Amino acid sequence: MKIAILSDIHDNVWNLQAALRALDNTDVMLCLGDLNSPFIVPMLANGYPERPIHVVFGNNDGDLFRITKNAAAFSNITLHGEFFRGELGGRRISASHFHTIAAELQTARTDLLCYGHNHLYLVEQRGDCLVVNPGPIMGFDPGSGQDVPASFVVYDTEQHDVESFVVQPATADDISDSTMGLVVKPYAQAVQ
């Protein structure tokens, strides 16, 4: 099973649309919070049709009433509140928007631990547990006031590994593959 993991959308509909277009070969999505506005919910549901989307809330998801109302209209979206803990593709997964809550969720039996919030991409093996912060789809780190790669990852439950990707402006060489002038490239190729 391939699991799309993204976080910190912060209403960046352009980067989100490019990322969703690149996720056709995935089976399920974990969204780690900070969607921001309720209108992001139908964009997720319609851009990732007929596949499950698990959402945890972030600190910038202020209009929870309308986010919840919008999510109720889509059978493929499940809201989990502050954290998700479950099994997908035979792997035990824990996820939260916050690294502090995610750390509390980690047990000796956790295969994959995911969080967002700090807008800092991280893929790190800690014992048997793979720890992932996919980075922000937004492409900005408010802590440093700097642009950062607009990134997301795809976790392969069989390989227990991730492929990392970046949404970036298209060049003349890849404009035919672009969505609104944006392309998705492997993280290692895009960030040097």
Image: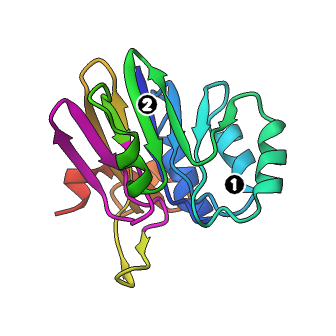
Left or right: 120 as drawn, with respect to 69: left
Would residue 186 be found to the left or right of residue 30 on screen? Answer: left
Q: CA distance from mark 2 to mark 1?
A: 19 Å
Mark 2 is on which residue type?
Ile
Q: Residue at x 60, y 34 (%)?
A: 53
* Point 44% across, 79% down: residue: 142
The residue tagged with tag 1: helix, strand or loop? helix
- Give the image location of residue 191, x and y in percent: 22, 61
Q: From the viewer's perspective, is residue 80 above or below residue 110?
A: below
Secondary structure beneath dot 2 equals: strand
Q: To which residue does mark 2 refer?
A: 3
Quarter the C terminus occupies: bottom left
Quarter of the view holding residue 120: bottom left
Q: Splitting the image into 4 quarters, where does residue 45 fall?
A: top right
Residue of label 1:
40
Query: Relative to residue 78, is residue 146 depicted above or below?
Result: below
Asked whether, in this view, residue 181 is left or right of residue 90, the answer is right
In the image, residue 30 lies in the stretch drawn in magenta: no
The outermost residue toward the top is: 90
Asked if the stretch drawn in magenta spans residue 125, the answer is: yes
Q: Give the residue drawn at x 25%, y 37%.
A: 130
Q: Within 10 angstroms of label 2, few (less than 14), some, or many (20 or more) residues?
A: many
What is the x, y in percent for residue 94? 43, 36
Could you say where residue 47 lies in the image, as x and y percent from the top left?
Answer: 64, 41
User: Which callout, 2 or 1, points at the residue further toward the start of the chain?
Assistant: 2
Front residue of 65 and 122 = 65
Could you tell me the amino acid type at mark 1?
Answer: Ile
* The magenta segment: 114-139
